[in-house]
Image (cartoon, rainbow, N blue to C red):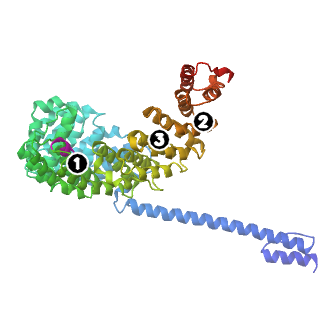
Amino acid sequence: TSPSSDRSLCGDVLGRRPLFGCGCLKTRLAAAASACRQNTVKHLEACSQLHTTMSAARAGRALGRAMGDAKGGGDGRFFSTTKKGETGELRAELQSASKDKKIDAVKKVIANMTVGKDVSMLFPDVLNCIQTSNIELKKLVYLYLMNYAKSNPDLALLAVNTFVKDAADPNPLVRALAIRTMGCIRVERITEYLCEPLEKCLDDTDPYVRKTAAVCVAKLHDIAPDLVADRGFVEKVRDLVSDPNPTVVANAVATLTEISESRDDGDALGMSNARLQKLLAALNECTEWGQVSILDALAKYVPSEAKDAERIIERVAPRLQHANAAVVLGAVKVILEYMHATLDPESDLSKGYRKKLAPPLVTLVNTAEPEMCYVALRNIALIVQRDKRVLEAEIRVFFCKYNDPLYVKLEKLEIMIRIVSEKNVDQVLLEFKEYAQEVDIDFVRRAIKAIGRCAIKLERAAQRCVNVLLELIKTRVNYVVQAGVVVVKDIFRKYPNKYEAIIGALCENLDNLDEPEAKEAMIWIIGEYADAIENADELLAQFLENFSEEEHLVKCQIVTSTVKLFLKQPTVEIGRA
């Protein structure tokens, strides 16, 4: 084949002019293949760009469906604006005669406020929209006022007349909305106008308004406690405890509890037998968070007689099977308080109550979410601090799982130390020994420290704890040895002149100590047992070599132990050792 025909062939294959004018066929074909590969890469890049564009379009359509497009009327469109400097447009829409435009404009303002933009300059224009019979628009305006009234107190006063008017509206939703908003506007100049409508709403015929007014009293007390006392609002809220509606009762109890905590008044509820029966009746009918408020109030009430305590506990006990963890813990709190305040904690009746408390607490610990488990463990730690016998038989529940987060493991460790006894100390020590061989160094140190705390807490089990520590120290793992030295020092301080057999193992690992706390503990042991350690002077001399470089606590301990060594062995000269 001639070169000219080669050039023609190459040009026909590639669909363009020939690439070369001369050369062998092999070279020209290689160049043609390279050009084809380049075209293929460009084609793939173009396809990838097209795919990205189509994906972005699909994502945009999905976002539009989620948020609601402009034609569909979804409120999400108010968050998707890209306009800049639209304050003038919003002001014009707020001043529009069309109700729909006003609502949309206020929604845009609320959307900007929600994402953190400052829209306080529109305060007068939004305030002008407050005179409306539209509930939706009124709620939006009230929401804006609650957020910006504190920064514009003078302009907020202009809305007072509307608040007072709405507090007397035939619609109970409007009345409750007005009272709630006035209570949330934390401006002292508005509080004086709040008293009269609030007093009327506390006696309102609608329970929704009464429960809202009860909460408003707590907010008003936070701003002006003297005003609440002068106007007798606390007594009115106390009367609401006897309200036939359970939700009103729960809100009244929550308000009185908050007021009593703020002014250190233990009997703000003014508990009487009639009110107590009303609380117990409302406990079965109100919402779960209302039950929490009532249970907290019952826990602060101390019955005068054991029979009354038993009756209340029997009414509260069904709450132990509630699905809400807060209700369960509230019921546990009531039962524990009455057991120790009114009943005999050692009686058979109290033992029966302890058996009832254990299963719901175990259920809380076994929850799947680690955050919920952690909160439950924190509460259980307080419970076992008050009465460890509640969960003494359930100690295996607190054994750590391999997939537990560190913060859950540490809480379980603390609870096990609190409820450990001579009956279960052996299985607890085996568990702690396994923890001390894990890879998490912080958890290992806590586990070794827990072994020492068990030894200090249970004298009869101290020898078993020391044996476990000795096994761990013999592993010669650096951080295990150092944690063990610190723990052994605490055991020696608790039980002097006992368990001295472990000192030899400690001295063999002297070179592994590099942490100041471990060094300080080892030096203390050498000084304290200088008469029992044959080469105490040589061991102490090792620490003197780098005396100037040691931490302050190590230096102080070296000086103290040197004096102890001199008093016990006055003929020894450490410097010549």
Taking the spot 21% from the left edge, 35% from the top edge, the residue there is: 261
Do the CB atoms of the residues marked 2 and 1 lie less than 8 Å apart?
no
Q: Nearer the viewer, residue 277 or 93?
A: 277
The residue type indicated by label 3 comes to Lys
Q: Nearer the viewer, residue 276 or 312?
A: 312
Crowding at dot 3, Cα within 10 Å, few <14 / some 14-19 / many 20+, comes out as many
- What span is in magenta? 336-342
- Left or right, residue 563 beside residue 158: right
Q: CA distance from mark 2 to mark 1?
A: 79 Å
Q: Which residue has dot 3 on it?
A: 449
Taking the spot 35% from the left edge, 54% from the top edge, the residue there is: 365
The residue type indicated by label 1 comes to Lys
Which of pointers 3 and 2 lies earlier in the amino acid sequence? 3
Q: Secondary structure at mark 3?
A: helix
Q: Main secondary structure of the magenta part?
A: helix
Q: Nearer the viewer, residue 293 or 218?
A: 293
**Could you tell me if residue 212 is visible in this image?**
no
Residue 375 painted magenta: no
The residue type indicated by label 2 comes to Cys
Q: Which residue has dot 1 on it?
A: 138
- Left or right, residue 71 beside residue 543: left
Q: Secondary structure at mark 1?
A: helix
